[in-house]
């Protein structure tokens, strides 16, 4: 008998909102109906709650919410569903998908499909769940890959049109840009030059953003480029230019030859076809090997070191989690369609490498349902049965779905590509007592996914015997793919079945993200470990501490014990553990895997490089990492080099470092790094000219740290880097020679007026000193830099979350407004006013208790200002107490001091004459005494230590993890899972 499945809380909301069949006419609403009611009519962050209609008066309703409250609303503000329970949805799906069978078999397969859907044993992809049997117009496919654009204005516009049509219907799109000529290449028809492939990627990205704003489902776009393309370096770094490509995922298609060149430190040639070839317009489609095999010429544009390109990829991924890497040549070597339909791109989430006009046809086995409690083993027989039925279910979807492009229909019916994935893996492993990431777990994963692949392939062969093989099937080339050689080497019975019966589907296995469906079902998503076991659910009384069901069950049975070590979360694992688990599963996946290797914030560039190379060596088809809190940080030197600089100061006081480059959007901060009085640093500006960077002590606290602003104030300043041990070092540059204590004047009515007057804006000097505070907030760790002008805070910079996120943008805006307020006029109590108005501002969650409670980013700024003012007062007191001793020492040092009136201070090397002093003769002695006064606990440490012990009471998510605003519910709950952004509060996913 089918089991009754009751959904509660977030699971019920996701089901009713996304997958239950809707009644478009809300006039049909009756008393007793379960509805979704709009409780906050916000255009950007609307809020819906589940409730039951208790009364109706005309168009007005009384709705009792699940939370216990009763609200008054109108029928326009409710979503009425025809289906109220999963059982009703399962009935609809089973009947719709079985309708493809012959009349004699429809009843049989309706029952079989209903069996595998029952109790969520098989969870169909979101499009299938929402559309099958609900409307003949709704596509059942999630994502598409369209052909690379033809290299012409008309071709690019055609691709744009195809992309727009797919996205308007809710589909994600993958596009490979490699067919477009490079930047500055000649365009003969208009007697000009091309703006380059990357610029057109910006057009596709911008259009995706427009569709995102107009539809209920965000547009999703993947852009790719091959490693041979002359614009590849621009492509890798494009997201470091704010606003150019903001609505797309990026991946580089890497070849085996390129990886060989990286390992052997060889040159790498960037090339492009000869655009003057008479067949160029007709034959060029982005496939360089096919072009060369046809005897066509290519033009070399540049020769570079392969390692330089590789390092750029690694560094960019380390900074901002992009671009990802797809080992495309290896992918095609393993692909079953290699001989007739090469893979050119992946879908936006990366789990399906697809040919031109390929589609994603997805469902997932809920592995948590296949645990045999009596045997304490996997329920192998049940898993075999459900897997075989599921392959037929997905094969039927191909014939059931409507097609809006004839090219999609022709391609899908030619190859009949399906993708059976999984969810609940982590829950199953916990039930079995297997620690995810352990050596034994890799053996288990190999056995489990090998079993699933075997059963799926045998099922597809059986369907081929009954209904026929896919039209492009040819046994010999099919069985010679890299994947089939591997499969048949372990399971010879699969080869025998295919030789005898053929194959119904070119591929059958994938591993897609299941953020929304997995949350609805109440299990771990995809192949990922749980993101967290403990979370906080909002109620009328605040946030209640809760555990995910399997952890709660264990806690109930062991109330006084900690969870055992096989309860592991994504951040408990090392990045290498993630990659090795991915590789173990990839062996049995004929498509690819959407998975993120989560890394801690102190993960280094070198470790990132090793991780990417490990993924290639282990046979992964692609790799994406997410370093917690990753943001744009320019690496200049290691901590060791920084310490070497301090120890090497002599007469000139110069020290070498790498060249700083422009960084995107944000504050780069430095904690507990100092430049002592008269200290000089030198950098090379890349053209052979060294610039000396001098610094004067203005009498402010020696314990203060250095920080600089983003582009809106100062283009170059302190550049920070995270070294192998997570520490940071700095480099400082200035554009001019204005003293921090200089007073800016303005002219009014021909008279000079002090900048300290009440209605004059204080212009920012080129150099300010201050401190950076590290404070935990509901949005993750915030770095708040407060810089002083004449011992009074004059500007505030905030760095929260990843560059490009909504949180980052809002935090930067808050910092700018606060800085403007602090520097306009002098009313005596500006800082106190700012603290008063920012303190206590609350949001959707909080961190900590009592005096350490942080309710929002604004509240964190207020607390940082309070601490800053307290520390400043303490510094002034310490300076007064040590004034006599310092004055005596300075008198001794003055006898040997020299002056330098021509200081090089701006980054372009121009000289000025501001009589700034530098220490020369007795420089080392002064530095020594200065070190005694500044080697103390950094100001930020006081806050950081307390915040580390704080308890995170923000909405469901992992404490301390970087998060963004959810576009659905507005809470700070959007986190990286399975290579996709997923909301831990409402279940929203950008990939489903």
Image: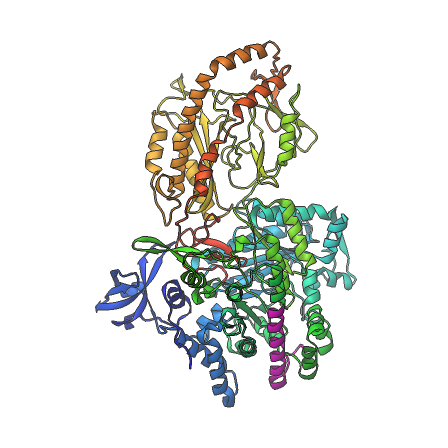
Residue 334 place in picture, x, y as percent: 69, 66
The residue range painted magenta reads 447-474
Residue 843 x, y percent position in the rendering: 36, 47
The image shows residue 60, relative to residue 242, as above or below, that is: below
Q: Residue at x 34, y 45 (%)?
A: 842
Side (left or right) of 393 relative to 300: left
Query: Looking at the picture, does residue 786 appear above or below residue 106?
Result: above
Above or below for 564 versus 131: above
- Is residue 554 found left or right of 415 in the rendered image? left
Q: Residue furthest right?
A: 295
Structure colour scheme? rainbow
Residue at 38%, 66% in the rendered image: 12
Main secondary-structure element of the magenta-colored stretch: helix
Q: Position of residue 579 (x, y in %)?
A: 62, 57
Residue 899 visible in the current orientation: yes
Q: Is residue 189 left or right of residue 983?
A: right
Q: Quadrant of residue 899?
A: top right
Quarter of the figure with the N terminus: bottom left
The stretch drawn in magenta includes residue 424: no
| Magenta span contains residue 452 | yes
């Amino acid at each position: 008998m089918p089991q009754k499945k009751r959904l509660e809380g977030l699971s019920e909301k996701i089901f009713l909102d996304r997958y239950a069949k809707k009644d478009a006419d809300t006039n049909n609403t009756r008393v007793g109906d379960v509805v979704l009611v709009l409780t906050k009519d916000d255009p950007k962050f609307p809020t819906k709650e589940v409730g039951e209609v208790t009364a109706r008066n005309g168009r007005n309703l009384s709705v009792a919410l699940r939370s216990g409250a009763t609200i008054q609303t109108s029928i326009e503000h409710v979503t009425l569903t025809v289906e109220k329970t999963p059982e009703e949805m399962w009935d609809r799906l089973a009947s719709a998908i079985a309708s493809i069978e012959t009349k004699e078999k429809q009843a049989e397969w309706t029952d079989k499909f209903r069996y595998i859907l029952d109790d969520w044993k098989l969870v169909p992809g979101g499009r299938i769940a929402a559309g099958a049997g609900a409307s003949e117009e709704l596509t059942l496919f999630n994502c598409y890959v369209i052909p690379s654009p033809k290299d012409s204005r008309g071709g690019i516009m055609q691709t744009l049109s195809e992309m727009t049509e797919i996205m308007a219907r809710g589909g994600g799109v993958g596009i490979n840009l490699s067919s477009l000529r490079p930047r500055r290449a000649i365009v003969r028809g208009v007697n000009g030059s091309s703006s380059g492939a990357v610029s057109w990627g910006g057009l596709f990205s911008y259009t995706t953003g427009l569709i995102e704003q107009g539809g209920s489902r965000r547009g999703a776009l993947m852009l790719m480029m091959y490693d041979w393309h002359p614009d590849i370096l621009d492509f890798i770094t494009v997201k470091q230019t704010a606003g150019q490509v903001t609505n797309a995922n990026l991946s580089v298609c890497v070849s085996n030859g390129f990886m060989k060149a990286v390992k052997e430190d060889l040159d790498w040639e960037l090339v492009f076809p000869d655009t003057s070839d008479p067949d160029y317009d007709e034959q060029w489609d982005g496939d360089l090997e096919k072009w060369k095999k046809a005897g066509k010429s290519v033009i070399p544009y540049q020769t570079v070191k392969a390692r330089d390109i590789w390092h750029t990829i690694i560094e960019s991924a380390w900074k901002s989690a992009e671009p990802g890497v797809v080992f495309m040549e290896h992918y095609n070597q393993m692909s079953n369609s290699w001989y007739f339909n090469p893979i050119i791109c992946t879908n936006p989430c990366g789990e399906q490498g697809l040919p031109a006009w390929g589609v994603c046809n997805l469902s997932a086995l809920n592995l948590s349902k296949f645990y045999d409690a009596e045997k304490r083993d996997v329920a192998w027989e049940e898993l075999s049965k459900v897997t075989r039925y599921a392959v037929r279910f997905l094969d039927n979807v191909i014939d059931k779905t409507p097609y809006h492009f004839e090219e999609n229909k022709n391609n899908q019916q030619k190859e009949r590509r399906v993708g059976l994935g999984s969810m609940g893996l982590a829950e199953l492993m916990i039930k079995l007592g297997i620690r995810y990431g352990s050596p034994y777990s890799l053996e288990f994963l190999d056995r489990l996914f090998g079993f699933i692949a075997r059963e799926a392939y045998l099922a597809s062969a059986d369907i081929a015997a009954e209904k026929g093989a896919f039209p492009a099937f040819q046994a010999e080339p099919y069985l010679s793919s890299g994947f089939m050689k591997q499969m048949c080497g372990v399971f010879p019975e699969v080869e025998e079945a295919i030789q005898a019966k053929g194959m119904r589907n070119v591929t059958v296995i994938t591993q897609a993200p299941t953020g929304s469906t997995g949350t609805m079902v109440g299990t771990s998503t995809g192949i990922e470990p749980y993101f967290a076991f403990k979370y906080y659910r909002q109620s009328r009384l605040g946030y209640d501490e809760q555990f995910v069901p399997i952890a709660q069950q264990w806690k109930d049975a062991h109330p006084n014990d900690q969870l055992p070590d096989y309860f592991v979360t994504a951040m408990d694992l090392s990045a290498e553990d993630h990659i090795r688990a991915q590789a173990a599963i990839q062996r049995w996946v004929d498509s690819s895997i959407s998975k993120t290797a989560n890394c801690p914030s102190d993960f280094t560039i070198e470790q990132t490089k090793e991780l990417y190379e490990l993924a290639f060596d282990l046979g992964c088809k692609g790799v994406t990492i997410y370093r917690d809190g990753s943001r744009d940080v320019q690496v200049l030197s290691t901590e060791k080099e920084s310490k070497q600089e301090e120890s090497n100061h002599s007469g000139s006081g110069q020290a070498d470092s790498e060249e700083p480059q422009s960084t995107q959007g944000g504050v780069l901060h430095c904690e507990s790094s100092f430049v002592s009085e008269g200290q000089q640093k030198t950098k090379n500006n890349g053209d052979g000219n060294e610039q000396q960077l001098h610094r004067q002590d203005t009498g402010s606290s020696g314990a203060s740290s250095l920080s600089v602003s983003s582009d809106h104030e100062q283009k170059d300043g302190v550049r920070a880097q995270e070294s192998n041990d997570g520490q940071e070092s700095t480099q400082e540059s200035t554009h001019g020679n204005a003293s921090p204590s200089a007073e800016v004047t303005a002219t009014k009515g021909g008279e000079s007026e002090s900048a300290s007057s009440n209605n004059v804006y204080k212009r920012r000097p080129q150099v300010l000193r201050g401190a950076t505070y590290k404070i935990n907030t509901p949005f993750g760790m915030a770095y708040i830099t407060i810089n002083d002008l004449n011992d009074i805070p004059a500007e505030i910079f905030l760095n929260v979350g990843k560059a490009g996120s909504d949180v980052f943008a809002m935090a930067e805006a808050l910092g700018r407004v606060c800085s403007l307020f602090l520097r306009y006029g002098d009313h005596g109590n500006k800082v106190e006013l700012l603290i008063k108005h920012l303190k206590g501002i609350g949001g959707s969650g909080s961190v900590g208790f009592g005096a350490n409670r942080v309710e929002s980013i604004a509240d964190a700024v207020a607390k940082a200002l309070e601490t800053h003012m307290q520390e400043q007062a303490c510094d002034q007191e310490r300076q007064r107490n040590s004034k006599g001793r310092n004055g005596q020492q300075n008198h001794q040092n003055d006898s040997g001091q020299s002056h330098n009136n021509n200081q090089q201070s701006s980054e372009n090397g121009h000289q000025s004459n501001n009589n700034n002093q530098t220490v020369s003769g007795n420089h080392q002695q002064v530095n020594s005494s200065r070190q005694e006064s500044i080697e103390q606990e950094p100001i930020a440490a006081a806050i950081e230590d307390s915040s580390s012990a704080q308890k995170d009471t923000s909405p469901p998510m992992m404490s301390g993890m970087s998060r963004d605003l959810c576009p659905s519910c507005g809470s700070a709950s959007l986190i990286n899972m399975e290579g996709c952004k997923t909301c831990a509060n409402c279940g929203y996913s950008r990939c489903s």
